[in-house]
Amino acid sequence: MSALDQRIVLAPTDGSLGPLLRIADDHLPPGQGYGRHEHRDVDVVAVVLAGALRHRWGDGADLAAGDVAVLRAGSGLSHDEIAGDDGVRVLQCYLRSGEPGAPPSHEVYRAADGWLDLRRPDAWLWLARPRPGEGVVVPPGLLVVRGVDGVLVERQDGRTVAGPGAVLVWQLDTGRPAWADG
C-alpha cells in the first residue's frame, strides 16, 4: 500500500508539448513505495528533489537529492520505487517513448547540473539548483521550478530565476515523431 502524495503539475491532452506527456510532483514518506507497476513505451525522467529513492528494476539503483534517473520502458517492464529513511520528493516527467518496443533500460545521472543528454532527438533537459538568494540564467523553453511555495510551470524565452529551488527547462520538438508516420 502506498502513501503517495502526488500533484500533477502538467498534463497536456492536446500533444502541444510533443513527447512530454505529464509532470507529477510526488512525495513518498519513509520506506513507502509506489507499489509494483508496469510501464510500456514511455520514458520516465525522475528528478530527485529531496531525500532518497531506491529503484527496484534490474540491478536497482539508489538515488539521492540532485540525481536524475531515466527509465526507458520500451517493450515493457515491471518495477517499484521505494523512499529512503527521510522520504523522498521527486518530479516524475513522462515522455512518449523515443524508441517504442526497444528493450528497457535505466540510467542514473549523479548530481545532474546543466544540459542532460537524454539520447533523444526530440527532448532536451537543462537543470540547476540555485541556493537561497542566488540567481541563475535559464535557457528558453518550458520552465519548471520547484521552490518552497510549490511548482511553477511556464513557457518562457530565457530569464533569471532566483533560488532556492530546483530548476528544469524542457526544450521539446513538438512535431510528429518519424515512427508515427510509418
Image (cartoon, grey):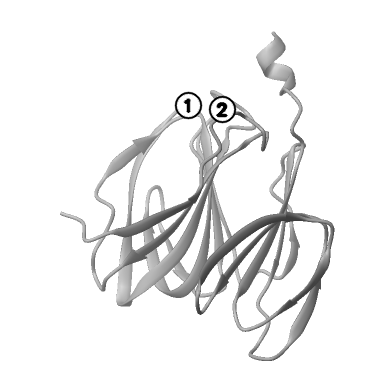
Which residue is disc 1 drawn over?
75
What's the residue at 56%, 27% (across, down)?
102
**Residue lying furthest bottom in this view?**
133
Q: CA distance from mark 2 to mark 1?
A: 5 Å
Q: Quadrant of residue 20?
A: top right
Q: Quadrant of residue 28?
A: bottom left
In this rendering, is residue 56 above or below 83? above
What's the residue at 40%, 73% (across, down)?
52
In this rendering, is residue 60 above or below 180? below
- The amino acid on which the numbered mark 2 sits, given as a three-letter code, is Ala
- The amino acid on which the numbered mark 1 sits, given as a three-letter code, is Ser
What's the residue at 38%, 48% (across, down)?
57
Q: Is residue 118 left or right of residue 43?
A: right
- In the image, 9 versus 77, the foreground residue is 9
Name the secondary structure under disc 1: loop
In this rendering, is residue 121 above or below 83? above
What is the number of the mark on residue 148? none
Asked whether disc 2 touches disc 1, contact meaning CB atoms under 8 Å apart, the reply is yes
Q: Split into 4 quadrants, where in the image is the C terminus?
A: top right
Q: Quadrant of residue 25?
A: bottom left
- In the image, 45 versus 154, the foreground residue is 154
Name the secondary structure under disc 2: loop
What is the number of the mark on residue 102? 2
- In the rendered image, residue 127, in percent from the top left (x then y), is placed at 69, 66
In this rendering, is residue 170 above or below 120? below
Callout 2 crowding tier (Cα within 10 Å): few <14, some 14–19, many ≥20:
some
Q: Earlier in the sequence, mark 2 or mark 1?
A: 1
- In the rendered image, residue 92, in percent from the top left (x then y), is placed at 48, 54
- In the rendered image, residue 124, in percent from the top left (x then y), is placed at 74, 49
